Structures are given as structure tokens and as C-alpha cells.
Amino acid sequence: SSPRAVEESVYEVVGGAYRKANITTLELRFNPMKRNRGGERDLDHIIMASIRGFDRALLEYPVKGGLIFCLDRTFDERLNTILVEKAIAYRHRGVVGVDIAGPRHPEFHYRDYAALFKKARKAGLGITVHAGEEEGWESVDEALRYLEPDRIGHGIHAAQDRDLCKRLAERGVLLEICPSSNLDTKVVKDADELGEYIATFKKHKVRFSFNTDGPEMLETTLREELRLALRSGWVTKEELAECGAWAKEASFVRRNGTP
């Protein structure tokens, strides 16, 4: 992508989220290294373009927000280290956290990134980690043990282990559940199975929120995800409000005081 395209994309995503779903606190996660054409574009130019897009949107809409740099499980440690170093370098310009996602890779292990994520945390960045989506509960367990995340992306298969649920609850780790995404990718069999997982989280007092994942690709909005949760009977209106309060509390934007 060109820097100009990145800037416009970020601007449109933030503005569109406000116009379509009245989103006033937004964290936008992406991997800037996947936008520099394998090194053809300067990485800092891509990052600054995303910051400009965010700044423009924040000037025009009543929104608070921040960027999360997403490491990739298929990248080697050298590339992922660069992403964390860039996140730390731009933490005063709107970068609020780091994540690690991407397709499963046989040589990837969460434990290998313990020192790197500790460095990010020490610098004041929020930590969220994709785990327990297409993988089993063991991935959430490893991420929790070695990376000490504030939040887990998806994390639904954590419901398969009672002791893990208890530890998630004790640490106050929030699960970012994405219903439409999970149903679309078939990581859950159907809405009933997803409801069973959510019931387990409620039983063990695990915090969770409902999220969109890829709203453009899935043609959904946060409003639609919340309606789906109510319509499916996964939560009551009161419980949904509590989920919203948990999400607000877990936001890296408010923690870092990002404008």
C-alpha cells in the first residue's frame, strides 16, 4: 500500500465506525509491515501515514482512539521485534498496544515472545494476543502463562478447560469474542455451541466483550453483533451492559490517555 492509501483507509475506518455504529472509542489494529510491500515502502512512512489518518478522523469526529500494532505468527522473531520497537517508538503518537495474530505456524510458540512482550508492557503498551480461536484451550493457557496479556483475541476455546477459566477470571483478562467471525470461519459448530462457551465464561466469571473482528469483510457492525448476542440468548440486556463496562475498563485508549 502507498502511504496515501494507508492514511485514507484509516481515516475512512474511524469515520465510518462513528457514522454507522456511533463508535466513540476505537482501537484499530493492523500490521504496518504488511503494508510496505516487503520493504519497498519505508516502514516509518507507513506508520506515520496511519497516524495522520487517525489524527484527521479525531479532528472531525467525537472519537477517542489508538493504534495496535499486530505481530504475525508467520514472521520470524527479527521482524516481530522490529514491530514492537516501532510500537514503543510511536507510543506517544497514538500507538496504544501490541497484538500477535495471523495463521497458525508449526514453529510459532507464544513462550518465545515472553521477553519482547515484557518490554512492550514496561513501555506502557497494552497487550492483547490472538489465541483460542482455531486452536484449542492450550494456546490460551500458553499465552496467559508467558505473555501475561490484558486481553485475549477471541479466546473462545478457553471454555474447554475449567482451571484456565478460573485463572482468566482471577487475573481479570478480557476475552474479545467475535460472534459473526467465529460462525463464519467455523471455529465453532454453530450459535448453540458458541452460546455454551459463553455460558461457561459466565459461570466462571470470565470477563468478555462482543466485537466485530473484520466489519467490512463480514458486513457487520458492533451494533449488529450486540443484537446477535441478545437475539441468540447468550446474554441478557443487563449482562450486555456489563460486557460494555468491562470493555471500557479494558480499553488501552483510556489507560494511555490517548486523545
Image (cartoon, rainbow, N blue to C red):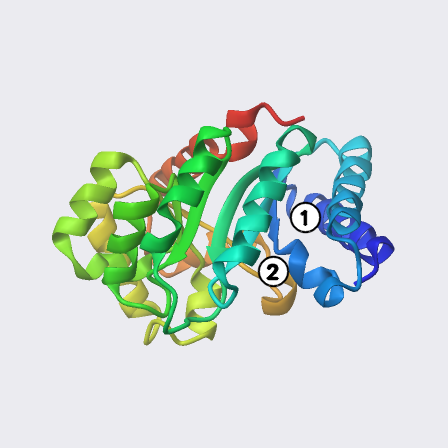
Seen from this angle, which residue lies furthest top?
Answer: 257
Left or right: 160 as drawn, with respect to 2: left
Residue 157: % across, % down? 28, 62
Q: Pointers 1 and 2 in contact (CB under 8 A)?
A: yes
Residue 226: % across, % down? 47, 51
Residue 24 seen by the camera:
no
- Tally the numbered discs: 2
Q: Quadrant of residue 65?
A: top right
* 13 or 117, nearer to the observer: 117
Identity of the residue drawn at 39% across and 35% down: 246
Q: Which residue is mark 2?
A: 215
Q: Which residue is mark 1?
A: 17
Identity of the residue drawn at 63% across and 68% down: 217
Q: Quadrant of the N terminus?
A: bottom right
Task: Mark 2: give few (<14), some (14-19) or many (20+) Cα within 10 Å.
Answer: some
Seen from this angle, which residue lies furthest left?
Answer: 163
Left or right: 104 as drawn, with respect to 193: right
